[in-house]
Image (spheres, grey):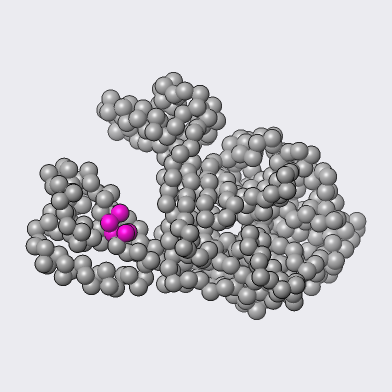
Amino acid sequence: MRISVERKPVRVNPDPKRVIARFFFNGNDRAKEVIQRVMSIDEEITFGIVSPILQEYSKRHRNITRILSRHCSKLKPLFAELNIDYDTLTVYRKLLIGSYFTHEYSIESAAFFNPSIVEDPDQSELQDGERRVIISFRAVGEGHISSITFRRALIDKFNNIQVIPSGNYIDEAEIVRNAVYNKKLFFEKAVTTQINIDVLKEVESQLDVHFEYSNLRRIIQDSQQLQENDMLRLEYDKILWLADSYYEIVFSMDTDISDRVIFPISEYERKGIEDARFVKFFNADGTSTYYATYTAYDGSLIMPKLLQTNDFYNFRIMPLYGAGAQNKNLALFPRKINDKYVMISRIDGCNNYIMYSDKINIWEEPVLLQQPKFSWEFIQIGNCGSPIETDHGWLMITHGVGPMRKYALGASLLKLDDPTIEIGRLKEPLLIPNSEEREGYVPNVLYSCGAIIHNNKLIIPYGVSDSSTAFAEADMDELIDKLRDDWAS
């Protein structure tokens, strides 16, 4: 028999009103035509057109004038080609031009799912038995482009969950590119992206052992100017795309957690940032750091990446390296074990692997941990977030894929001091789609990217058929007993 699981009366649904204002560009020729048309009208007409735009969209964006100005400034090279002195343009003309190169994107219009949950850094002003948490979501909009968004929630002493409503605005972060690259690691990763090997060798030969983004960009631009083959010129661009995968982002301090969206930035993630698995990592000195593994997708290539933050305002992002950093489904353990970082992965798309590393971004020598064993997971088994430490072992929520590509959640138990050893596993799913959860963007799918234990209850936020997010609860004592019983029988 399966253990009892209580579904919470809480559902978080996508909200199409959650929009960001993004740069819109249809190519140099059409852009120049638009600029010339706006330049042809006089200042009074310019003000008459842009004024109602500012009034209307100021209700939808925190600082629409700053956004339009920034988008206009992106066109400076085109103004130069048109012999227009950008600095002499009036504020209203710049804002109007910027508005023609801006479009709204609804980040949640299609789906809001695959959540993970971690303890909020701020646990102040709570009553006994309460806990404040941050939930991350995979938000999907037009073109099936995924981004990471957040909500804050409160769990009370009775384990009731209150998801705090989102704010009125949503903001992208400022991008900071100040990484120093390790040449050996960078070009090892470049080989896996199938960039032309001769181009890679040429660029590599011109770089120091450690190099900065500005140096790489200068070498790329110089090499492209000497290259007449358009296809090879694209190969140089791909090297810059990889370099763009390393960056820092900074959100304004006046934003609520629900106001912040991590939207695809680099070319290698242009089709989406998928399934972030957040974990509160406990350092040896007693401090903690929040990490998240996620999948960057460019439409054909999968690139596992690592995100790091202490406050959910400032984030550092980098690719993961090594034979174990392949495919999807990487999940970091919340502390070192035997003085090494530990990660779960699914490098072959079917089985769970485990690996150790001295460095958090380099993962080699994955070891097979689990294979599909029961009929409800015959197609594949994978993790549903970082393992959770308990007195009885590492609790790992899993997902299994069975007949009719139905996704169900399971659970396993790993030995505390040696998680390569499995000591418990449910024979039956912990949670399967019920009749109200089967329909959605992708039917018959339940999926989670992280759970939490509170008041001796396991709380699992989970995506409902790739459409919305729900919550379930299981008693920890009952779950541990069932894991042991099923393993022994």
How many numbered markers are drawn?
0
Q: Is residue 89 left or right of residue 453?
A: left
The residue drawn where x is 41% and y is 25% is 203
Q: Position of residue 289 (x, y in %)?
A: 64, 50
Where residue 197 appears, x then y in whole percent? 45, 26
Q: Position of residue 61 (x, y in %)?
A: 37, 67
Q: Is most of the magenta stretch helix, strand or loop?
A: helix
* Picture coordinates of residue 425, whole percent (x, y): 81, 56
Chain part drawn in magenta? 66-70
Whether 335 is drawn above or below 197: the answer is below
Residue at coordinates 43% horizontally, 68% vertically from top-left? Answer: 169
Residue sticking out furthest to the top? 205
Would you say 94 lies left or right of 259 here? left
In the rendered view of the protein, which quadrant contains the N terminus?
A: bottom right
In the image shown, does 60 or 377 lie closer to the viewer? Answer: 60
Q: Quadrant of the C terminus?
A: bottom right
Regarding residue 2, the answer to whether it shows in the image is: no
Residue 360 at least partly seen: yes
Rendered view: 117 above or below 293: below
The answer to whether 7 appears left or right of 227 in the picture is right
> Which residue: 24% across, 49% down?
75
Task: Please check the rendered image and state whether residue 85 is part of the magenta-colored stretch, yes or no.
Answer: no
Figure quadrant of residue 304: top right
Q: Nearer the viewer, residue 128 or 462?
A: 128
| Residue found at x 50% / y 32% | 181
Q: Nearer the viewer, residue 191 or 334?
A: 334
Residue 58 appears in which quarter of the rendering?
bottom left
